[in-house]
Amino acid sequence: MATADIKKIGVLTGGGDCPGLNPAIKAIVVKAHDCGVDVIGIQDGWMGLVSDGPYMHRELGLDIVRTIDRSGGTILGTSRTNPFNMEGGPDAVVGKFKALGLDALIAIGGEDTLGVADRLCNEHGLNVVGVPKTIDRDLSATQYTLGFETAVQVIMQAIDDLRTTAGSHRRIFVVETMGRHAGHLALKGGIAGSADIILIPEVPFEMDGVCRILADRHSAGHRYSIVVVSEGASLKDGSEELQSQELDDFGHVKLGGIGQSLAREIQEHINLETRHVILSHLQRGGSPVAYDRRMGYYFGTAAAEAVMAGKFGTMPSLKEGRVRLVTLKEAVSKLRTVDVRLDYDIENYRHSHRLLVS
Ligand code: F6P
């Protein structure tokens, strides 16, 4: 489809919110406006296309998006709705898409939202383009997903802030990050904050190893230590810590709580006072850092360009410093986890000190 065939597009944000969504929405609206195309904002992710509620969509003009790139969250709202998990869900989406007179849709989301976008495009013929976002940065086919750098900044700031109190009291602090099944957030936040131990889901840990490192630091005269643990990390032969057994619409469990049990275990094993902080949704808060504003602008603009060029079933991705289109299928085909061989030191439970690869 050429530019002339596109008159009206929809945009939605799905899954967990994060800073960077609003800059992407703004870029889409600005680019569309430049091309003489109207934009309809769909409220609350896929929910806005399966329900008939009165406030589930609105026109997005330049006046509405002018200042939104400075704020976190999403002006469109979000949800973890999966139309493929509902009786008649996909047909409802197609029906509403037609009723709104849309020629194409841009879905901004992670693995789940983009998985739905891919199926709607390939199985139901809907003109959909994606934009990658998730603080977990676990999508394959792109080196960046919106929200990641802001979340890393929050982790680093929390570690910086904890140092003075940890040092004053001679305490160990365990900082629990999000990241579900990928350790990127814990690893990059831990590197930026210079954490002493970083525990990631990709490498199950042994309590004895962790305690040995902390006890050695104490004997060497360090007043405190910082341990960063990803919510999805687990003990060797153990399982992840769950907040509840309940599954969301995409079959995910709610993780969280390992920070607390790890702090308790450390204190019991080596008799050094240990406290914990769970950063939880603070990592998805605040205004986007400069990189998320820039990437929101790049990804949003490129997604709108892809729509105008009729390149449906694709998503802009970051590869070797350039924005390129990849297929949604590639993006959701597998989880991108930490490359342990290159980036992690499994003996010392921290990032690798070796950077150059031969
Ligand atoms: O996928 C992003 C993420 O923030 C994960 O890191 C975390 O496990 C999950 O979402 C939490 O989701 P919710 O806000 O629905 O509890």
Image: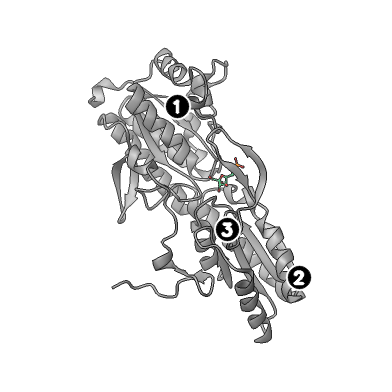
Beta carbon at label 2 within 8 Å of ligand 1: no
Q: Can residue 127 be seen in this view?
A: no
Q: Residue at x 64, y 69 (%)?
A: 207
Residue where numbered disc 2 is placed: 268
- Per the image, label 1 sits on a secondary structure element best described as loop
Distance Cα–Cα, label 3 vs label 2: 20 Å
Beta carbon at label 3 within 8 Å of ligand 1: no
Q: In which quarter of the image is residue 303?
A: top left
Amino acid tagged 3: Ala
Q: Quadrant of residue 328?
A: top left
The coloring applied to the image is one colour
In the rendered image, the quadrant that contains the N terminus is top left
Residue 260 in the image, given as x and y percentages of width and height:
71, 59
Q: Nearer the viewer, mark 2 or mark 1?
A: 2
Amino acid tagged 2: Glu
Horizontal relation, residue 112 to residue 271: left or right: left
Q: Is residue 154 above or below residue 71?
A: below
Instruction: Tell me, for residue 61, which label it has, or none.
Output: 1
Q: Residue pushed farthest front? A: 237
Instruction: Tell me, for residue 96, which label it has, or none.
Output: none
Ligand 1 found in image quarter: top right
Neighbours of disc 3 within 10 Å: few (<14), some (14-19), many (20+): many
Residue 12 in the image, given as x and y percentages of width and height:
47, 30
Horizontal relation, residue 338 to residue 190: left or right: left
Distance Cα–Cα, label 2 vs label 1: 58 Å
Residue where numbered disc 3 is placed: 233
Residue 231 in the image, given as x and y percentages of width and height:
60, 54
Q: Which of marks 1 and 3 is in front?
A: 3
